[in-house]
Amino acid sequence: MSAANQPTPKAAETAAPENTLEIRKLSKVFGGLRAVNNMEFSIPKGALFGLIGPNGAGKTTVFNMITGVYEPTSGDVIFNGTNITGLEPHLINQMGIARTFQNIRLFQSLSVLDNVRIAYHPHAGYSMSDSIFHNHKYEVKEKELTERAVEFLSVFNLQDRLRETAKNLPYGEQRRLEIARALAANPSLLLLDEPAAGMNPNESVALMDLIHFIRERFNLTILLIEHQMRVVMGICETIAVMDFGERIALGTPQEIQNDQRVIEAYLGPGSAALSEKFKRKKN
Amino acid sequence: MKKIPRSSLIFYGGALVFFIVVQLLISFGLLNAFWNTILRLGAVMAIVSLGLNLIYGFNGQFSLGQWAFYAIGAYCAADITYRWANLGSAGGLMVVLMIVLFTGAAILFLRTQLSKIRRLDALSAFSIYLLTTLILGYVALQIGKALDAPVAAALKALPPAVALQVVFFFAVILAGMLAAEISFLFGLPILTLGSDYFGIATLGLTIITKVLLDNSDTLLGFAEMKGARGMIGIPKITTWFWVFLFLIITIVVTRNLLNSSYGRAILSVREDEIAAKAMGIDVANYKILTFVIGSFFAGLAGGLYAHINGFLHPDTFNFIKSFDPMIVIVFGGLGSVTGTIAGAFAWALVLEGFLRLFLPEGFETWRFVVYPLLLLIMMLLKPSGIFGGYEIPFIRAVLPPNQPKRAEDLRSEDAIQSQEAGL
């Protein structure tokens, strides 16, 4: 099955190899609505990149275009120097981009272990006829795969929940499992869609630690959508801000916090002037 | 040599004992023809329902088309053995064999080639497959006809009883494969629909099949099928041995498939298609694969069914009857192999057996009041079916035990480090 699905990417002409992901003039039109308009940014290898913006700015649409859920109307997505625009989601995942979802999407009624083992499926190493006959190759590979999954789960301290059904886990552990499942596919780029949504301050701090931890341990580049400013400003090195489908700012957390257009996008027109006044008063 | 697990020993041992006990009861005439038929019907129903449970219970695609593939399998196998038993011709066998081989090879070949094309839409793919299958089917028909005489001569060298069994065995297998290939062609365009629409489309298939069978002698040109008058003269050779053998094979194949990485991929599609795609699972591929395997079982069961009574009538394949396997799997437990088998035998024993015997004369129709009521009560009391998600140890997947949690978690590791740095 996997042999039949070899991706046929066309190589990009001028992709700087040090950038893990490059988004070039990406646009998506739904009927008359321009959800994303000429979006551009690039993420260097190993970076922690944040994508923020008010609700409905088009952040998740960008995610969906990167991961192949939507086909972009125009523009290119370059991953590690390869143009992956318009590839099907499962091929993009197999190339090394994994994601989590805004509202957790676990395989609810399967065990925690199976959630991770499914991520290993593209590299299962045995054919379907091996599995139907339960032959020696199946036994060996299946055992190997299971051991790998158990070991992997213990990295995330979920090894005491192996047999638990995913939907019975507490919320924080479900988030952790979702991130673990995404990482089990061995990606080089991880997309996190609002990982801190619905978390209390303590849980978000734990999440920030987890993100730092996995970045180092798995040698990852991370793209993050988040609404909790504490999380975004706390861990991202570079931040892009979107509003009405367009990029309105790009820079370090410091620069973003002082950007007039960003403040206006979040708090409404005229608010930038107000905040200036407020700052002066404070000084 | 590795040790055979205890659960397997119990399962195979239990199956063997069950088989021998029933076989002895039949041989000594303790089980009359009526109950014998009921038991065989139960096993056949178990095979169809296992196929449907794979599609609906495990893959999450609501299908009402299972009965159509059952019908295709029944008529296909019946026609093969009819020609052999009554006309002494191996034409049916050879033609179906050639068609299955040729189109099967073509489908496999096209599948590897077409997967190289990016975002090929389902309808274009469908047209390519259909054209290729039709052309190759025609070629296969001619070759099959040419092979009729030599193969018939070779089979006639065998003792007649053995030859009939051989033809029957291949007829059943080929019936399954033909049903599987038709399900592939049919499933290709409609599996892109959402689950509810898929259900309606498959219901359409069941109705089309019934209408075609009603007119099989005129529209399709199979005079021996006699259209709405019903096909007679099929050898009654489905013994308890054959149904039991095929049932065990079906159970073992289903279990082996489900307890593998491929089975987990099938389950992931049911759980969450979008998440499955994001985890590298080719969702469209697994939907069609499951549909094809499920239909294969349906065709197999159809082939066995045709040779129980020696009589086939299109009314048996009415779309109302297509709810029978659906009722069996809902009653037994969606996504439970054990429940499906229990449900199928319960369906045969209670509905076709006891109720038919014990309800007073003229009240047989009340069966169809009793079992919807049973189903209703069932839904209210235990919506997950009798067995819910339960499986006997043989079928259940073996999971490693939970490991003890580490004393400190990720958070505290970091906390300790930062504390040390602070000091």
Image (spheres, helix red, strand yellow):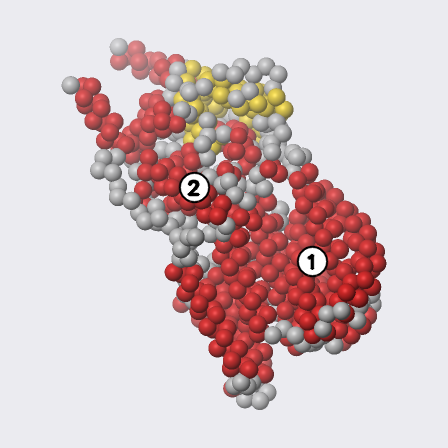
Residue visible at 48% across and 24% down in the picture: A243
Residue A145, which numbered label? Answer: 2
Residue visible at 19% across and 23% down in the picture: B419
Q: Nearer the viewer, residue B393 or B312?
A: B393
Q: Is residue A104 visible?
A: no
Reading the image, the residue beneath label 1 is B178
- Which x, y percent locates residue A141? 46, 43
- Which x, y percent locates residue B217? 81, 69
Establish if B86 lies above or below B340.
below
- Which x, y percent locates residue A101? 44, 37
Q: Chain of mark 1?
A: B
Q: Quadrant of residue A86?
A: top right
Establish if A90 lies above or below A270.
below
Q: Quadrant of residue A265?
A: top left
Helix, strand or loop under label 2: helix
Label 1 amino acid? Leu
Marks 1 and 2, how far apart at CA:
35 Å
Q: Nearer the viewer, residue A121 or A249?
A: A121
Q: Nearer the viewer, residue A35 or B257?
A: B257
Q: Is residue B229 visible?
A: yes
